[in-house]
Amino acid sequence: MAETARAREMRRLLAEIKLSRQRLITQLAVDYRPTLARLRDAYEAAEVDIRAAVERYGRDGDTDRLLNAVRSELAQMEGLLTDEAATLQASGVRGGVQVGVSNLNAGGVGVRFNTATVQTIQNAINFVDSAAFQEAANAFAGWHGDQVRDIILTATAQGLNPRETGLLIQQYFSNSKRPLVDATRLTRTTQIYSARYGTRDIYAEAGIQEWIWSAALDNRTCLSCIAQHGTRHPISEVLNDHHNGRCSMIPVTPTWEELGLVGGTEPAYQTGVQWFNGLPADEQRQIMGPQLYEAWLNNEFVFAPEVISGTYNNPIFGDMTVRNPNWKILGGNGSTPPRRPGGRPPQTPTDPFDGPLRPTMNGFMPQDVGTPGSTEAQLLEFIRANGEDTPLSAQLWSADMQLVTYNDDFQLGINNANVKAAAKAFVQESRNIQYGREYLLDLIAEEAALNGVTGVDAAALLNDSYKLQAEAILAAANAGNVKLTDAQTRRLNEAVAGNYLDMVYTTDSSVNGSLANQMGTTKLKGVELDEARKNFMEWVGGIDF
């Protein structure tokens, strides 16, 4: 009877904790809405003046004046960032303590909510006053000003005039809203981490020695959180889930023996690995992705937290637990992925782009593992598995195109507007290259050599870079059901086929949109030639692969 009662008590405890977790998530979202509204209002006010500055730049081409205006307008958001984060830090701690008290009481540990305790915990956490937070907030305007400067350099290298360049800058502020996204991510993460510390600290106050990692197990849960589910941690640790995570900490309450009761058996807590093993095969494949799923079936890796999860260090919040990329799960280490079964030996690839490391103008990169698939879920799994360190995945993450972004609810997804804008920009760029072909390839070869890539044809390097960009746009459009024009689809597919240079530098008038004024050699001379070359080299150095 004792065992049955204990098992029943465990089920009740887990049900209560699940409810308290959902209450916390809901409360944090409610508390965040006023902050989001104020950040949006501030950004939209700044955007009006930035738009006017961009329009003025289209007429006068004064870069310094534009950059000063951008930095001045965004600087007004820096103080708001700190103020809102401080407010959210307080509400986060309070919410975290409340859910901790609820969990402890559900587990039979009597604790009362105490405002003084909340204030003590809040004083101990205090992310907002840290040097790292202040540095991030104070660098907000300058960092985004630098992004605008890079857009101008890239556009200048491509031969675009100030009016055309202004359209690209407007896209950065109006379509992607990157500054607003960064502001909301910083403040939201402050709130969530404050709540986690609040929960951990109230457990410590109550004498709890350990907690169990509890993930919200469903088809939205990342593989790392599944692997971590059910792991036990000392109270000295805090749950360090990734940005926008939904995991929580379950207090380890006294055992039968510790309560002085004889004959009871502790009910087992299901781990994430056990939960995953019990899923239907199609759900397992969807969560893991096809390539990793097949490797798992073939016993090529162990599904365990130490294999699936890794960490990266955030200067404000410390180490965050994230999913390892596939190549690392499959046994890779350092920056080199494992060789795929049946692949060519690393030292003698027939095609340099088929080797384990792919040559780019900026150096060598590990190959992507798997494919983006045909659905949004598959594409997101692909980029989570590969991160920003592999060629195609890096293009999908690209800060320039922003094909994948976080929405207002902090869910990662395909940004349909940005996909359309990227396809349009790709076609526009392919019609406006103003450098001679041989001159362009000489610059590519020189830049590649500076980054340790030699012996690879410069034309092949350039074609491959545009192939990856086109593949990313088409993959996002396919997965996000984004309708592209026939002209866009045709040009993108031509680039995917490796024919970008032939498409751009052609005398065949039947190719729609090909360059009307071919340039076999550059017409620039002297100082103008040196300046154009300098701009182009800066552009190449900033390309995201």
Image (cartoon, helix red, strand yellow):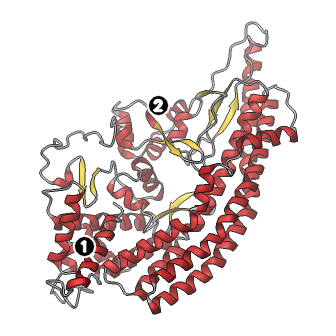
Query: Residue at 57% across / 42% down in the picture?
Result: 318
Quarter assignment of residue 296: top left
Q: Secondary structure at mark 1?
A: helix
**Residue holding disc 1:** 494
Ranked by sequence position, the earlier of labels 2 and 1 is 2
What numbered label is drawn on residue 348?
Answer: none
Quarter assignment of residue 257: top right
Amino acid type at image mark 2 = Glu
* Residue 116 % position (x, y): 87, 39
Amino acid type at image mark 1 = Glu
Task: Calculate the distance from the C-alpha at mark 2 to the C-alpha at mark 1.
Answer: 43 Å
Query: Residue at 47% across / 80% down in the picture?
Result: 64
Q: Is residue 67 left or right of residue 85?
A: left
In the orientation shown, which residue stands out farthest toward the front?
527
Say which of 204 and 430 sits in front: 204
Quadrant of the snapshot with the C terminus: bottom left
Quadrant of the snapshot with the N terminus: top right
* Residue 132 % position (x, y): 59, 50
* Nearer the camera: disc 2 or disc 1: 2
Query: Residue at 21% across / 67% down in the picture?
Result: 444
What numbered label is drawn on residue 306?
Answer: 2
Q: Secondary structure at mark 2?
A: helix
Query: Residue at 18% across / 43% down in the picture?
Result: 346
Check disc 2: other Cα within 10 Å, few if <14, some if 14-19, many if 20+: few
